[in-house]
Image (tube, grey):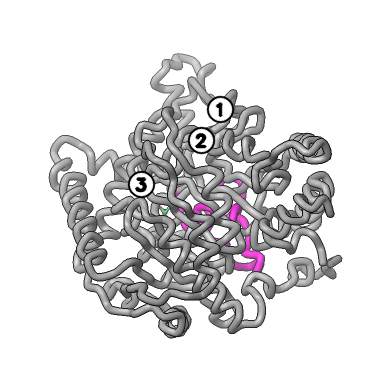
Amino acid sequence: MSLTRLTAVEQADLLARKQVSSEELTQAHLDRIDEVDSHVHAFLAVSPDQALAEARSVDHDRATNQDLPPLAGVPIAVKDLLATKGIPTTAGSKILEGWIPVFDATVVRKVKQARMPILGKTNLDEFAMGSSTEFSAFGPTHNPWDLTRIPGGSGGGSAAAVAAFEAPLALGSDTGGSIRQPAAVTGTVGAKPTYGGVSRQGGVALASSLDQVGPAARTVLDAAYLHEAIAGWDPKDSTSLNEPPPAIVHAAKLGAQGDLTGMRIGVVTQLKGEGYEPGVLQRFEEALETLRGLGASIEEVDCPSFDYSFAAYCLIMASEASSNVARFEGIRHGLRVGEDEPGATAMTMMSATRAAGFGPEVKRRVILGTYALSAGYYDAYYGSAQKVRTLIQRDFAAAWEQTDALVTPATPFTAFPLGEKVENPLAMYLCDLATIPSNLAGIPGMSLPSGLVDGLPAGIQVLAPVRRDEVMYRVAAALEAALTAQWGSPLWANAPDILRQSGKEDAR
Ligand code: GLN
């Protein structure tokens, strides 16, 4: 079997037993990228020289029996929203084209400390605004399960890279669902940690009170290892939690033993009815049965304020986004347009740069957010949305009185055809119906495969109380183990061949 089809944990194991070198492993992934990425377009930039140099350095340290972290030598892809020293970082926007950061985001630094070779930067919707990667200024990513469909967004590149065996692991960021929704529609696993559990420093901000960096992987245990490698306090991020991260790898291993006896799992009434595809709901109901079989009790939980979470999210996200992207003005980074025009001033240059550099979705959100924050409307829109946010947090607090974890379908529908919703922003925003409440409340959430609907992956979401990420990993790992046993193999192992879809024979 090809090395690229192994999980990250299996790869780490082979490395530790010196049965494969990191150079071979990294080269195998670079070859896979060469083979399929012209069809998938998961990557905006590939960095073979840096990746191989790090791989050789890990191999050298292993040969000389030095102590190495658990994922040392396992390659990774990084969402192009996270600053990487010496590697271009675009955030999917033309306005940053040509910007080469002089620093690493804290999570990138941690990945380097974990000794993981960085394969390259993955595609995303511009400034992480979107649910399909179609708002990337550099063209969309294609879903490895069906190249004519969306891979989710904004982190479609990271999820597709993992689903297409171009990388065993990837980093993403989740403001309203951008790690979990792409995971759901590509048959992979994606986790949004507790807000503050992983540093946001060096990530290009969309909405600072909602953004959270997290892992994309094929298995829950792989995600746990990456999560643990990037978690922890960062003095450079004022919202970072100054406490030891939860023991998530341990929890994932415990969960995989398949016993959830005594665990109380809630199903949110508001997150499984209208707007959800029947096939997605059916896979969800079956997963509930499986959870019962593992010893968990299932009860319905009412969260009435969740009906307003979508509206509150749109206002808070757009308000914060409009002020965050105001820093792009053609002076400090990337693109500059119109400075040589006759009569040009700083103002005309900034306005010409933004007109040329921002895509339609970014402009839409800047207009919406600026309006919501303007003097006469602030209380009516932004202020009301913040009140709703408090009500949502209270609904969660009440739910935790009765339950240990909550489950919902991760997304209302499976991957839709490229182009279907790109002209309809409201329909696009609805992809995140089930994922948004956890961003508003700062709680951890993750998506794992629940099965196929007409040949396309669907996801189930597990939510846990704030700072209790380990509960989410335990439930998810138990469910994953039971579902994999039912199916006879992991869902991701059965994705259709990419080269055959594109009319060529797959080499594997
Ligand atoms: N799809 C959502 C949006 O467009 C979420 C984006 C994200 O999580 N970065 O805002």
Can residue 132 be found in the magenta stretch?
yes
Position of residue 281 relative to residue 372, above or below, is: below
Marks 3, 2: nearer the viewer: 3
Quadrant of res 96: top right
Relative side of 56 to 473, left or right: right
Give the x, y percent position of residue 419: 54, 63
Q: Residue at label 3?
A: 210
Q: Is mark 3 within 8 Å of ligand 1?
A: yes
Q: Amino acid at mark 3?
A: Leu
- Disc sitting over residue 334 in the figure: 1
Give the x, y percent position of residue 62: 78, 40
Q: Is mark 1 within 8 Å of ligand 1?
A: no
Q: CA distance from mark 1 to mark 2?
A: 9 Å
Q: Amino acid at mark 2?
A: Gly
Residues at circles 1 and 2 in contact by the CB criterion of under 8 Å:
yes
Which of marks 2 and 1 precedes in the sequence? 1
The stretch in magenta equals: 129-158
Please tell me whether mark 3 sits on a helix, a strand or a loop.
loop
Please tell me whether mark 1 sits on a helix, a strand or a loop.
loop
Residue toward you, 98 or 351: 98
Relative side of 415 to 389, left or right: right
Task: Count residues near mark 2 (Cα–Cα under 10 Å), then give few for <14, some for 14-19, many for 20+.
Answer: many
Q: Residue at x 20, y 48 (%)?
A: 386
Q: Residue at label 2?
A: 357
Quarter that holds the C terminus: bottom right
